[in-house]
Image: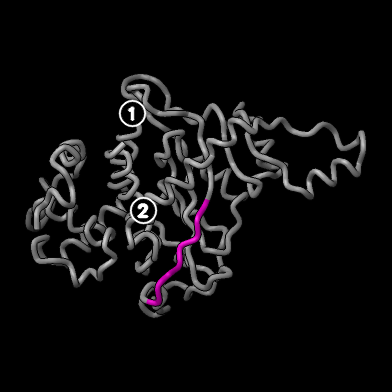
């Protein structure tokens, strides 16, 4: 199998300097990073079981263990953050940011982690307020970010994307978790470091979201950060304001023209779901699954 089919030479040359080194570590040196990374990408792109990886990528156990390690030690998040920082330094990040979430079904193979094996509660839809993100990628939530939504057992992927549909922040919750409460966590994780002196950028110019993100708390948070809010009001909010008359105050500002650009976050999710291992969750642990989503985001930045 040709490596060019998985990862081009140009793409690999971008991320190779960012890969960790096994120098100074105890044990045998790591197998060639490129071969293993291509195996990880192939697995998520095709959705095959780890055991079914073609032999051209080396032992499947090595590929799986390397992905586990890089997901938990923050390697994928550091590469993702570096690519964003380089794009921002070149003025290529569009800071009209959109937020949304998508629900991905969890395969039966992802929901069989027993209490005895994990030392954690079985996936029953509890702990839906958990935030699995770059802030602590090694922490495995008690519910493994699997819950019961209308379609069955599922995981919800939350994103902030720039105006060119490239992921800036990625978080996971159980499928039944609400969208609006996650906004404060996503914004807290938005910190694009500078190439050179200067503090990380943590504030977008605008924040675009659908009606699910319309709440008093979210609007107050965005005002405090001086971020222009482009979120339509829900029908019940409009009705309550009209019913209260002058005491209801003025409606929040809303730009319907700028709001049309919110489709970028939907298109970003479409890009992720071109990988069968992302569209359907096969991984038992949230840390492993989120690592695959972040790796997909890295490839989106490399392509764009």
Percent position of residue 25, x then y: 13, 51
Secondary element under disc 1, as helix, strand or loop, is helix
State the residue at coordinates (22%, 58%).
Answer: 42
Q: Which residue is mark 1?
A: 87
Report, in whole angstroms, how far the alpha carbon at label 1 lies from the one at label 2.
20 Å
Is the residue marked by circle 2 packed among few (<14), some (14-19), or many (20+) residues within 10 Å?
A: many
Q: Nearest the camera: 123 or 272? A: 272
Q: Specify whether 287 is left or right of 220.
A: left
Give the quadrant of residue 253.
top right
Q: Specify whether 302 is left or right of 151.
A: left
Percent position of residue 55, x then y: 9, 66
Secondary element under disc 2, as helix, strand or loop, is helix
Q: Nearest the camera: 274 or 143? A: 274
The total of numbered circles placed on residues is 2
Percent position of residue 76, x then y: 29, 47
State the residue at coordinates (69%, 42%).
Answer: 217
Q: Nearest the camera: 36 or 119? A: 36
Please give the label number shown on residue 293. 2
Extreme residue in the top direction: 197
Is the residue marked by circle 1 packed among few (<14), some (14-19), or many (20+) residues within 10 Å?
A: some
Is residue 286 placed above or below 259 in the rendered structure?
A: below
Please give the label number shown on residue 251. none
């Amino acid at each position: 199998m040709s490596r060019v089919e998985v990862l081009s030479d140009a793409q690999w040359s971008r991320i190779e300097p960012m890969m960790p080194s096994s120098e100074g570590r105890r044990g045998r040196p790591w197998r060639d990073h490129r071969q293993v990374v291509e195996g990880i990408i192939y697995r998520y792109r095709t959705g095959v079981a780890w055991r079914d990886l073609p032999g051209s990528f080396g032992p499947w156990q090595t590929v799986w263990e390397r992905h586990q390690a890089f997901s938990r030690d923050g390697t994928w998040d550091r590469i993702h953050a570096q690519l964003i920082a380089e794009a921002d330094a070149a003025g290529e990040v569009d800071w009209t940011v959109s937020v949304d979430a998508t629900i991905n079904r969890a395969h039966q193979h992802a929901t069989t982690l027993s209490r005895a094996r994990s030392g954690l509660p079985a996936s029953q839809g509890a702990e839906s307020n958990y935030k699995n993100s770059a802030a602590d990628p090694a922490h495995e939530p008690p519910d493994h970010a699997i819950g019961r939504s209308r379609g069955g057992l599922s995981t919800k992927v939350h994103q902030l994307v720039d105006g060119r549909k490239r992921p800036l922040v990625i978080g996971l919750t159980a499928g039944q978790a609400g969208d609006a409460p996650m906004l404060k966590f996503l914004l807290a994780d938005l910190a694009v470091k500078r190439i050179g002196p200067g503090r990380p950028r943590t504030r977008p110019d605008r924040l675009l979201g659908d009606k699910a993100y319309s709440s008093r708390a979210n609007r107050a948070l965005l005002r405090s950060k001086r971020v222009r809010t482009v979120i339509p009001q829900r029908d019940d909010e409009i009705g309550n304001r009209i019913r209260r008359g002058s005491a209801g105050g003025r409606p929040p500002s809303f730009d319907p023209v700028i709001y049309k650009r919110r489709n970028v976050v939907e298109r970003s999710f479409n890009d992720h779901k071109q990988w069968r291992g992302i569209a359907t969750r096969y991984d038992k642990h949230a840390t492993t699954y989120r690592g695959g989503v972040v790796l997909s985001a890295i490839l989106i930045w490399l392509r764009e």
